[in-house]
Image: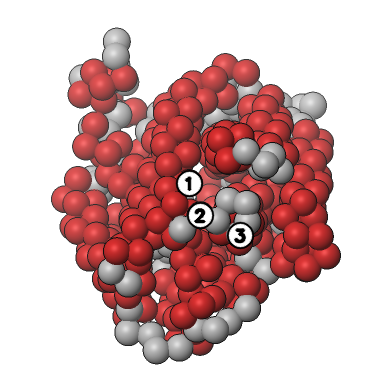
Amino acid sequence: MSELSYYLEPHSQPDRTVPSAWAAAAVALCGVCAFLELYCTQPLLPMLAQVFHASKTGVGLTVTAATLGVALSAPFFGALTERLARKRVIVASLLGVSVPTLLAATSTSLGQLIFWRFLQGITVPGVIAVVITYIGEEWPPDRVALVMSFYVSGTALGGFAGRVSSGILADRFNWRVSFLVLGAASLAGAAAVAAWLPHGRRRVITPATEKTELAFLYQVQGLLRNRRLVATFAVGFNVLFSLVGVFTWITFHLSAAPFLLSTTALSSLFFVYLIGLVVTPAAGFLITKVGLRAGIAGAICCSMTGVLLTLAPQLIVVIVGLAMLSSGVFIAQTASSTHLRVAAPAGARVTAAGLYITCYYLGGAAAGVVPGAFWALGGWPACVGFIVTMQAVGLAIALVGWRAPKAKPSNPDGMDEPLRG
């Protein structure tokens, strides 16, 4: 049976009915819209430094502000949406991302732009935290990794489209037009998700007398005692740190001699994301077969190799390195998101997703600033050495922290066996 026919034909178990192909498309579109604006200033950084007469670290805050907004608001979305309609939260959040994107075009100073970028990030967790849980609730366990890969591919497409279009539009018109176009595209995407994404059909609300209904802080405390979850949070921090760190700071490296790339050329580098769109769904199948620990190990090793290749003086080798880095990161994100579903207790999965997203985007926020200290010490080679070291630490954490308990716990969802780490 083909993947498309699997979605279109009735499932053999009535209580585990698979959502339609339109639902899978809506999940992917959620990823596109959530990430369309999040990193759109990366190819614009050399231009913004000239426009606002700012330092590299100063304009880097336009990346940090958006990711920091995501990190700070994610836990609160986890607490507020644990018992709310998933689709309603997702659609409202998509609309919430669009407004500050449009308003960012009105900025007359770098401070104003950073402020609107921060507000852009605030509502993003209403999409990404809830979609991760929505997938686990609406698809059978043996299809979660696959559909999660569709979502991750959507995030890759959104990140790619946002970066490429912002650079091209800024070069051809000006940077303000970039924000106007991306904001309008987000509004259209929100309308499509509202039309295609079904209301949750398989969600079970835990009674108020159960442990899952305890206070949010108590719930968080319990989650932070889970070794496998804490390791997943740390891996998430590391995964986004490497991606944002490389793609933010390499723009300054490639805009200088001997490469001297223009803003349009810098934005074109993000075509390597298209490779991730092909690789990630295939990796979803592979991870199901080889296990999560093997999957994350291969993904991080691929990323580390890619980062090291960016030291080459030939542009084509740098591009290959960026393709390996981004593909490895997308695969690692699929593995981490799937492991989050395995390790989190059933009554607190949105809260766990919120904590994961907080750590993930704290990594992105740190990557917009921290490598600047290494840039000051030794330029791009120093940044590469630092980022590869961080990746090695993340790999060690995953291999040790994702090790399954010796005594197999009871798991009514049946997630442990096919996706055992």
Q: Secondary structure at mark 3?
A: loop
Looking at the image, residue 230 lies above or below residue 182? above
Instruction: Name the residue at 19% across, 45% down.
Output: 196
Q: Is residue 410 left or right of residue 66?
A: right
Q: Secondary structure at mark 1?
A: helix
The residue that mark 1 highlights is: 269
The residue that mark 3 highlights is: 256
* Nearest to the observer: residue 149 or residue 356: 149
* Marks 2 and 1 in Cβ contact (< 8 Å): yes
Q: Earlier in the sequence, mark 1 or mark 3?
A: 3
- Residue 357 percent coordinates (x, y): 56, 57
* Nearest to the observer: residue 273 or residue 335: 273
Looking at the image, residue 68 lies above or below residue 225? below
Within-10-Å neighbours for mark 1: few <14, some 14–19, many 20+: some
Q: Is residue 390 left or right of residue 34?
A: right
- Please identify the quarter of the rendering in which residue 97 is found: bottom left
- Please identify the quarter of the rendering in which residue 377 is found: bottom right
Within-10-Å neighbours for mark 2: few <14, some 14–19, many 20+: some
Q: Earlier in the sequence, mark 2 or mark 1?
A: 2
From this viewpoint, is residue 113 visible? yes
> How far apart in space, not on screen, are marks 2 and 1 (Cα)?
10 Å
- Residue 361 percent coordinates (x, y): 59, 60
Amino acid type, callout 1: Leu
Q: Secondary structure at mark 2?
A: loop
- Residue 166 percent coordinates (x, y): 36, 61
Residue 261's tag is: 2
Amino acid type, callout 3: Ala
Within-10-Å neighbours for mark 3: few <14, some 14–19, many 20+: few
